[in-house]
Amino acid sequence: MILKRYAKILVLAAIFLMALAISGCLEEVDADFQQPPAQNFADTFSPDDNWLIYWYICGSNLESGGGAATKDIEEMLQAKLPANVKVLIQAGGSREWQNAFVQSGATNLFLYSSDGLQELVTAPDSDMGDAETVASFLQFGKDNFQADHRVFVFWDHGGGSVFGLCQDERTGNILSLNEVRDAFAAVYDANTENPPFEVIGFDTCLMATYETANTLYGYAHYMVASEEVEPGNGWQYTSWLKALGENPAMSGARLGQVMCDGYYEGCEDVWSEDTVTLSVIDLSKIPNLRAAYENFGIEALRLSAQNPRQFFSSLGRNAKNSENYGGNTRENGYYDMVDIGDLAENSKDLLPQTSTTLIRAIDDAVIHRVHGPYRTKGKGISGFYPYSGNDNYYAMYTRVNAAPDSQKYLYHYLLRGSIPSEAQGILASTGLNELPQPIEESLFSIAGLDELKIQVDKKNNAFVQLTPEQLENIAYVNCNLAYFDEADDIILYLGSDSNVKIDWKKGTVTDNFDATWPMLDRHPVYIEVTAVQDDYNLYSIPILLNGERVNLEAAYQYSTNSYKILGARRLSSNGMADKNLIKLKAGDTITTLHYGMTISGDDSDFTEAEVITFTFTKDSNLADERIGNGEYLYCFEFVTPNNESASSQFINFSVDDNGITTNEIE
């Protein structure tokens, strides 16, 4: 019954909307946008040196569902290679391959060289999410090919420091960072002066992390990886292999730069560059970076021990405003990865002794990077931050050998209310000789926030007044909006936004409601804010795209007061971010998804419903439109640093042709 009422009210909602100003969804990037300045990396090798590129292709559902691996292999085949540059390929991990040469249910080894593509071995099936499979591939290359310089490229999904990479579609197994190091250690000795690999790269999502780089220290000179989720086109294999073939004398730094630049240019060609990132990290700088990041955590741990609620609420606000990756919201799921440089930049006042040193260490280690216009604040290396508040994710993080101890102890305190005894030594070195007493219940309290009454000021604005104690429990505040109609017995949840005015010193939170809401081709949509920056916000919008449930990604640019549709992404699975960013095209069918419940019934939660189906056109756009006349419920949502939330009492906005009337609800 609820779905029938819900669908009916959504159809009626279309009547409330005004005409839209047309602006194409594939608009050009702002002409003022600039990439970071590029360095000139000199050639350091002989043009006669031999190169061997190991390409580890875990096809997964990227291949079985759309042939993404096959497309990249075809890109490789367009690069003509000299006799001294070879690509050794292992392909597996997919239920089905979209080409005639890779066999399903087998381990496929190929060599691409000046003689073309040759099949070397078709061996019994192996698990591409297992460290032994990686080690066997490394051993095969070592035993059969002489090389002056080696490159290793992982290809598949990635899930950041916690979840790892390369999920075999048949077994479901995933390589952890510990397993990645174990695989290299099984074949090569770590050598910090002369690592066995020139470059180790990740054509995967979310792997440009401190923990990944620290894992590979001693095994490569350089690491190339993305902080953010990659689009489906991935790296451009024609460009960087062609460049290496034409100049085998180039350094690993130059090769990494070519990989980055070719990737970005390839994304521009298919309009998927908006949120991309790719970094070249000099792994020889890891010791300095490691010390700086550990000290950043130690300073944070010391200050948190003195006043945990105040410290973590401030750190949580800094993290919320820092560039973070993979979405980190209820709708998108959580990967708990933040750009540690941006976090340090935002924490200079909070952590004055170590923030600047950490930023300098990052800038020294990241020798080249590219990024899209909606990923401008990152410095090239991410790290774990528990946005989700998920203790299981934190437990997985503690098992990452390359993760800093100080960060593990810090987030133990944040999530579990105590500092581990193992931290005694490092805290004593800072002058803190006793650990604070454990807090038996949650470190943060939302008690009373869900009872908080919204008031109305003389200007007809809705606001709440928070006490200093309440402020210490809050990292950020969002607003939630719902349409309700007593006659139709329906409440329609429209979503959440960051569009509120907060005075953190005075403790006042005030609405910024103007009777508009994002509309896709004049159809109301459910939204969830995923990133808040000085010049733009990012949003996630659940829809059905040609019958498949996806999250539509959109950016709101403050300078133009307009939205840009970035694309759609499938939901993640098992911690692996989906690499396919789907660009919408004319003729696509879109069905809006909303959440509703009855007013009179005993519904305990909102129910998702498919509401309005329409066809996307070349003139389709997303825009803030005036919502229909009627009654709206509005509340403030308070989120703690460990991601618990509570909502204030509701207030009523009554919208009609004369404007907005704010009414307290008794």
Image (tube, rainbow, N blue to C red):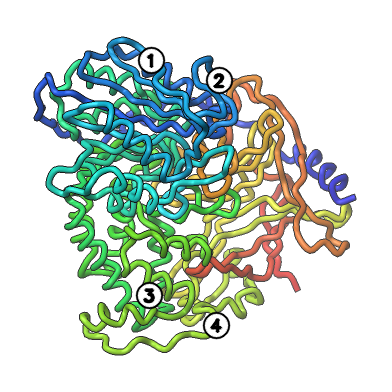
Left or right of 464, for residue 255: left
Residue labelled with disc 1 = 118
Residue assigned mark 2: 98
Residue 230: give x, y in percent of width and height.
Answer: 44, 36
- Amino acid under disc 4: Glu
Contact? badges 3 and 1 (CB < 8 Å): no
Residue at coordinates 48% horizontally, 76% vertically from top-left? 416
Q: Residues within 10 Å of mark 2 (few under 14, many from 20)?
A: some
Mark 3: amino acid: Phe
Q: Which residue is mark 4?
A: 441
Judged by depth in the image, the label closer to the viewer, 1 or 4, is 1
**Residue 278 position by quadrant:** top left
Closer to the camera in the image, 27 or 204? 204
First of labels 3, 1 by sequence position: 1
Q: Is residue 117 above or below residue 620?
A: above
Q: Amino acid at mark 1?
A: Gln
Instruction: Name the residue type under label 2.
Output: Gln
Q: Residues within 10 Å of mark 4 (few under 14, many from 20)?
A: few
Do the numbered discs 3 and 2 sit on residues whose CB atoms are within 8 Å? no
- Marks 4 and 3: which is nearer the front? 4
Q: Which mark, by number, is residue 311? A: 3
Q: CA distance from mark 3 to mark 1?
A: 59 Å
